[in-house]
Image: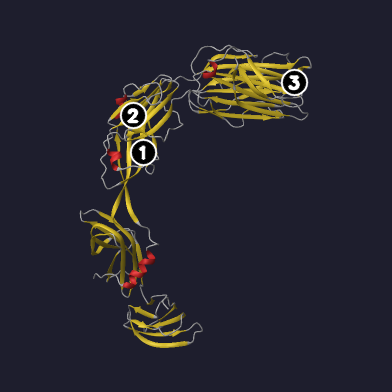
Amino acid sequence: MFATATPRTKRLFIVLTALVFVHVTQAQTAGPNSAGAGANDGGVGANAWSSPGNIVTSNDTYAAVSAKGISHYLVATNFGFALPTNVAVVGIQAEVERSTNASQHVALLDGWSTGLTKSVSAGTNRCLLVAYAQENGQNSRDITGITYGGRAMTQVAEQVAGSVGGFNARVEVWALLEAELVLASGTSIVPTYAAYTPVEYCEAYSSATFQHVDQIALVSNQQATGSATGSNPHQLATPLAVLAGSMAVNIVTSGNNTTPGITDGGTNTYMINNGFTEGTDLYFANTAVAPTSGACLQTAHKAIATDGTEQPACTFNGSVNRWMMVGLTLQRARELDHRVRIIKGGVIGATDLSSPNAWPTSDAYTSYGNAAYLWDESWTVADVNAADFGMALSAFVQNGEARVDHMRITITYAVPLPVELVAFRAEQDGEDVRLDWATASERDNDHFVVQRSNDGQTFTDIGQVAGVGNSQLTVFYGMQDEQPLAGTAYYRLVQVNTDGTQTYSFVVSVTMPTGGSVVYPNPTNDGTLTVYDGAAKSLGVHIYDNKMQLLRQVTVGSGDPTELLNDLADGTYTIVVNNGEEMKTSRVVKVTRER
């Protein structure tokens, strides 16, 4: 039943080698392994972790740091890997179970007040917010900068709305954070304006101080809506996204007086719903030019308990013309990754995979790296198996306590397969199916089991071929299936090592005729054809050229190779086969490849 490949088969494999996917290695994982030891490393930050050894198990005991600022590295080592020596490390994934505790929500520290002075109380992670609203009859007056106590503020929002007739309204929001507030030398708010042409110009300022505000990313979401025409009530076109512990701030202005009109400095211009607390409510005008046609400003805020959206509606107490609304979310001060790095040979690496996301308020794992990432390092098995292999994490603490419950690592590695299979095919060979395959290299290859299936799912052993054992040269194998299935059959190889371990090849298929006659090979190289018909032993064959002129009439044995086209020129021929009961027509191409 078994035979080696013929020279013709070997030539064919030279072509197939470039076409077939090569199975060289298979990936496996080790871990996740827990750290065996935890420690502080003062190579970064100023604040030490308490109880660093608590990271070795997930048991709600923590390594923790609560001092504000950047922590030391929390170093995890002794992961206890024991990878085989002949594998290649292809990926390292680190995981940290982390959370934050006792964090404070954003809170109003100094309430909203108008004017260009503001006293700021002592607090933690503070933010001074200044809102500017103006109206002008010709163009908008832009602020190019604001200082508070001599410290430069940062603009966080700006919106302009115009109207027919040239009047413009503008809202700007500026902020100053903790690091600059502690350096402020006074309480004065000093704006710097761009050039403009005043026409009934009027302006108003409102400011408030909040604390427990994130100092890295102050605003987590911002929305603005405005119109040159009146609509009442006003509402943000897109809801404002809010997070638990944050503060929603809403600022609205309208370029008109209330009905009935009020004097400069009057209140009760707007009503706001959705549980917002009003801060400033003010009518402002240029009393020297147009005392009764100024504009109105309202500021408001709302502490947020849960993640969601806010879409406040502000009703103006009068007839609206141009208006605009700015909403923003002041984010709660968060605990964040500062650095996350791998340790190789006891040295903390350069690549940082820290996440920008806030630490959660309950324990959850965060992953760094993956099964195909090596942290921009080259690795040996000895590196990973060493006790000084590990990872290091430092945290940026703003609000409460950063806690780490557990640190673990998973290694993905590639195991070289014992056999590098580069070709496998199945084709009809008369009444049989011929199976051929080739290997580019072998290590401890005991034998191949050939399996067959009628559905490509369930396979049955049909034969066995011995392997050569060890080789770095191309080796060709073959086997004949002398009792093939009718219709389509599927084949695969099971490669068995000397230690009994197994790997499987890809699946190939071949379709055998279920009735009538078949002519092969097609195309033919030398003109020799085999005509096979399971219903007859001898067959009448008529050969026609492309003009359907009869060239030859012969009788052949079913399954016998016959020189039917050898002396004919290359081209396409019609073959009519008569088995005594029916006739079947095939078109066969002759192409001479070796001339």
| Lower sequence index among marks 1 and 3 | 1
Is residue 98 depicted above or below 22 in this figure?
above
Placement of 442 over or under 368, stated as above or below = below
Residue in front for this viewpoint, 389 or 298: 389
Q: At which x and y percent is residue 232?
A: 67, 26
* Mark whose residue sits in front, 3 or 2: 2
Secondary structure at badge 1 equals strand
Q: Which residue is mark 2?
A: 75
Q: Residues within 10 Å of mark 3 (few under 14, many from 20)?
A: many
Q: Where residue 412 sits: x, y (%)?
A: 33, 43
Q: Residues within 10 Å of mark 1 (few under 14, many from 20)?
A: many
Residue 431 in the figure: left or right of residue 316: left
Residue 541 figure quarter: bottom left
Three-letter residue code for mark 1: Gln
**How many residues crowd around disc 2 within 10 Å: few (fewer than 14), some, or many (20 or more)?**
many
Q: Residue 520's image quarter?
A: bottom left
Mark before the other along the chain sequence, 2 or 1: 2
For mark 2, give the secondary structure. strand
User: Circle 3 sits on which residue?
Assistant: 201
Tell me which amino acid carries mark 3: Tyr
Instruction: Give the answer, above or below, for where 316 lies relative to 33.
Output: above
Which is closer to the viewer, label 1 or label 3? 1
The numbered dot on residue 93 is 1
Residue 411, compared with residue 582, is above or below; it is above
Q: Earlier in the sequence, mark 3 or mark 2?
A: 2
SS at circle 3: loop
> Which amino acid lies under the numbered mark 2 shown in the image of this protein?
Val
